[in-house]
Every structure is written in C-alpha cells, then in structure tokens.
Image: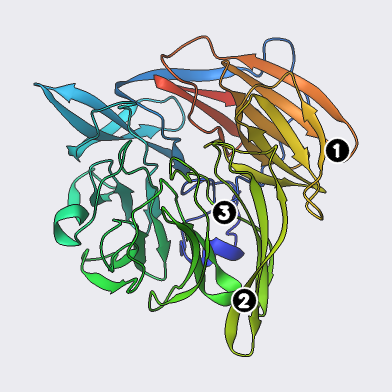
Amino acid sequence: MRKVCVLGMVSVIAGLAFATDWPQWRGVNRDGQSPDAIALSWNKGGPKQLWRVSTSGAGYASPVIVGDRVYITASKDSDGEWRGMLYALNAKDGSLVWTCDYGPEWKKSYEFARTSPTVYGDNLYLFGGMGQLVCVSRKDGKIVWSVDTIKEFGGQNIVWGLAESPLIVDGKVICQPGGTDTSVVAVDAKTGKMIWKSKGLSDTSSYCSPIFVAEVNQIVTHTKESLVGLDASTGAVLWKTPHKNFRAIHPNTPLILKADKQGYTVVVASGYKYKMECYKISLKDGKWDVAKVWEQPEADVHHHGLLKFGEVIVGAASKGTLCVISPDDGKVLYKVEEVQTPSIMAAPGRVIAYSEKGDVFLLDLQKDKYTICGKLPVDYGEKQHWAHPVIANGVLYIRHGKELAAYAVMK
C-alpha cells in the first residue's frame, strides 16, 4: 500500500506523488533520492530483469513513474524532420499505452531527447530541445496546450539545444527560455499563459532544471552567467552570484543541503574544470546575502548529478572517478576509481551509479570507506550512457538510447 508523502516538493505535486513514485526529474524532491527499501546487495550479474522494451525513438532523458504508468521522451527522424515523442508505458510489463508527437526536436550534435516530463494533476509537462513547452493529457496522450517559448517569450536556443525538465510550483510551470527579461518564466499549468517573467535577468539558459526551496519560497537555478534565486510567486530576482565556466554549461540541478525560513545551503557543480562550490544563502537586514562556504576543484561534475548521502556528498568528476566529499569543508574524502563518470541516485543505505562505461553499480559509501555491493552490465542500447537511473515502486529503471529496462530491486 502506498502512502501519500507530504514533505518538500510533494506539496507542489498535489495528490499524485506517492512515497514510491518518481513524478519528475531527479525524483519527488529533485534531489535524486528514492524512499524505497531496496536490497542491499545484488547477486552476480545484477538484479532480475523484469522487462525490456525498445521505443521508436531514442533519448538521454530519464523516465518518470506515477502509479502503474512509466512516461519517457525520445526523438526520431520522421520523413526528414526530427520529432519529439512522449511514450506512456505499462509499468507491469513495459507495453505501450499511448504515444504523443510533441513537436520538432533538436537534431544537431547529441540529437537524443533530453527532457524528462513532470507529472502534475491529470497532465504531463515537458520542455523540448527547440523550446516548446508542452502540456499533455495523461489519460490519452493528447496535447492540451503548447507554447513556442522562443517565439512567444523571445527565448534563445543554445549550443546543444535547450535541455530542461520543467518545475511546477503552486500551479505554475517554470522554465528557462533565456530571453531579454524572460530568462526564467512561469506559465499557468492549465492554460500555458504567462504569469510572471524574471525582469532584469536577461541571460540565456544553461541546461539546468531548477529546484524549489519551499522554506523560503525560492526557485534556484543556473543561467549562462550566474547562480540565481527567484521569488517563486513573482519571479523577482532575490539574489545572484557569478557562476560561469568556459562553455557556459551548468546542467546539474542545485543540491539543497539544509533550509529553514532564514536561509539555506546550496551546493553546485558545472564541469569543465569549474569546480564544485557551496554557498550559504541567508536573510540579513531584509535582503538575501550570498556567501561562499567552500569550493572543490577536483569535483567538476559535468551532467551526472549531485547527491547527499548520509554524511557525504557524492559527485562524478569529469576526469572519470566518483568523488566522495565532506559537506562541511568540501574536502575530497576518497575516490571510487572503479566507477567511471556515473550518473547517480540513492535509496536508503545505497547509491546507484550508472557509469558512462556501461555498468550500474550498487554502492555503500561511508565517510571513511566504500563497498561495491553489486554490478549490472548494460549491454543493450546505443551511444552514450547518459540517462540517470531511477527507482520507483521497488523497480530500478535503466535507459540507454532506444532501450528501457526494468529490474526488481525491492528488499
């Protein structure tokens, strides 16, 4: 029996996010955490595969799961035009329920679809690589509304296509078209009509999917030039601090370590030798103050995600190792050399690391040591192993190109 979770982001995804569902990018709270009690070790060869399916298009995006449905995006060539596809699958066996062509998709370098849909009420919301913000009915896959954010909001595309999974806060869909005074916008989830825009923040997108800090009603995200905090109700820029690497790519969702009404601590990393950084955001004399707590140049996480696990922070260095870091001072405690540049998530007691080399590792990461508790080879699919792993309802989902596989990992 599922229990309704009422913490953090779940208040935003009202009535839909069960304790073991994964209703959006990086999970219920966008922190890469699953509450599922999974098996703490795997037999040789990994957990049992329940099913594997091939979609008609390919993608880098992770699936989202709510109840008995799995939703995943892909892109494919259709009579010479690259199109974005959204699939609804039966979680029991992977069988197709419906498909939705949501519009033109990115076709240049690294052409696979990036956006993970967000479940909210009866609909799904996604942001395509060509700037389309789309609302799709969960019932039948029909498009409810679609907005070309480049045309309507003066947005700008970027080097490898817009790559964002929409955030929904109190009925507002948040996305980053990257236009003049429209770096970030909020539209009505029912209609697609603009509610607010981030005036004074005229900067392009940076591949980042934002996060909501409920304690202070702020949206935190990266633009091309800055790490920023916005008022979730009005879009007002509350604070910003310079944050730019030489490619202006900041694809990791910021990691919130702790928060209360007086402020919060956030960890960010952007790859390309920029370094990992920790900031304290605090309210002082009615204004928001930004203070750097520490930085760690060895942990230049590219696009593989940041994770808080027990007493440590976990992140992949783009040079090819998994770094385990102290949240207090940013010190690298050790590196897991066997695990090469993985996308990461966690369940109670274990980290799941999906390596770019094509293996999924089950890891126990303590402050002073680590144990590899299982390994699963991903010997199917094509091109880069970039999709993040997902655990929902006791099932591990691994995506590689056109292939999506489900594995039984319940304790």
Q: Is residue 285 left or right of residue 205?
A: right
Per the image, label 2 sits on a secondary structure element best described as strand
C-alpha span from label 1 to label 3: 23 Å
Which residue is most to the left? 79
Kindly identify the residue that appears in the image at 18 percent across and 28 percent down.
82
Q: Position of residue 124 (x, y in %)?
A: 33, 50
User: Between disc 1 and disc 2, whose residue precedes?
Assistant: 2
Q: Nearer the viewer, mark 1 or mark 3?
A: 3
Q: Quadrant of residue 299?
A: top right
Q: Quadrant of residue 103?
A: top left
Q: Quadrant of residue 342?
A: top right
Which disc, if any, is residue 366? 1
Residue receiving disc 2: 289
Q: Position of residue 356 (x, y in %)?
A: 56, 21
Kindly identify the residue that appears in the image at 20 percent across and 41 percent down.
102
Q: Is residue 186 above or below residue 110?
A: below
Q: Is residue 345 left or right of residue 174?
A: right
> Within 10 Å of the Cα at label 1, are there few (<14), some (14-19), or many (20+) other Cα atoms?
some
